[in-house]
Amino acid sequence: MNTLVRPRDGRILGGVCAGLAHRFGLQPWTVRALFLLSCLLPGPQFIAYLVMWIIIPGEQQRSATV
């Protein structure tokens, strides 16, 4: 499995759903749809998203070698 990072490309808001999708081999829209559906249920989904946005590191830009 891949490491859990927020990708630089393919982000919509913070890249959390895209990072989770990449980590578990899913399509980003699938994870986004599941997150939106989970928002219909009571619970701290938005807080969890914000916490993951802070905790999950962003993908580092690859340095170009000359």
Image (cartoon, rainbow, N blue to C red):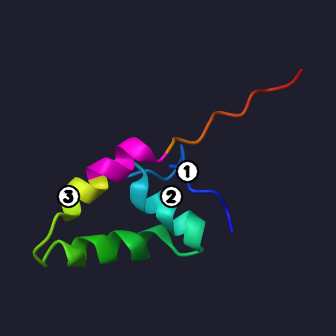
Q: Position of residue 18 (x, y in %)?
A: 47, 60
- The secondary element bearing badge 2 is classed as helix
Q: Residue drawn 17% across and 63% down?
A: 44
CA–CA distance in space, label 1 to label 2: 5 Å
Which dot marks residue 22? none
The magenta stretch spans residue 37: no
Alpha-carbon span between mark 1 and mark 3: 19 Å
Residue picked out by circle 3:
46
Image quadrant in which you'd find residue 24: bottom right
The C terminus lies in quadrant = top right
At a point 41% along the width and 76% down the height, the residue shown is 30
Q: Amino acid at mark 2?
A: Gly
What residue range appears in magenta?
A: 50-56
Is the residue marked by circle 1 packed among few (<14), some (14-19), or many (20+) residues within 10 Å? many
Looking at the image, tell me whether mark 2 or mark 3 is earlier in sequence order: 2
**Residue 43 to residue 13: above or below:** below
State the SS at label 3: helix
| Mark with earlier residue (1, 3) | 1
**Disc nearer the start of the sequence (1/2):** 1
Q: Main secondary structure of the magenta part?
A: helix
Q: Which residue is mark 1?
A: 5
Q: CA distance from mark 2 to mark 3?
A: 16 Å
Residue 26 at x, y percent in the picture = 54, 75
Which amino acid is tagged 3?
Phe
Residue at the spot of label 2: 19
Per the image, is 54 magenta?
A: yes
Instruction: Say whether residue 11 is left or right of residue 3.
Output: left
Q: Say if 12 sits above or below 28 in the image.
A: above
Q: Is residue 40 left or right of residue 23?
A: left
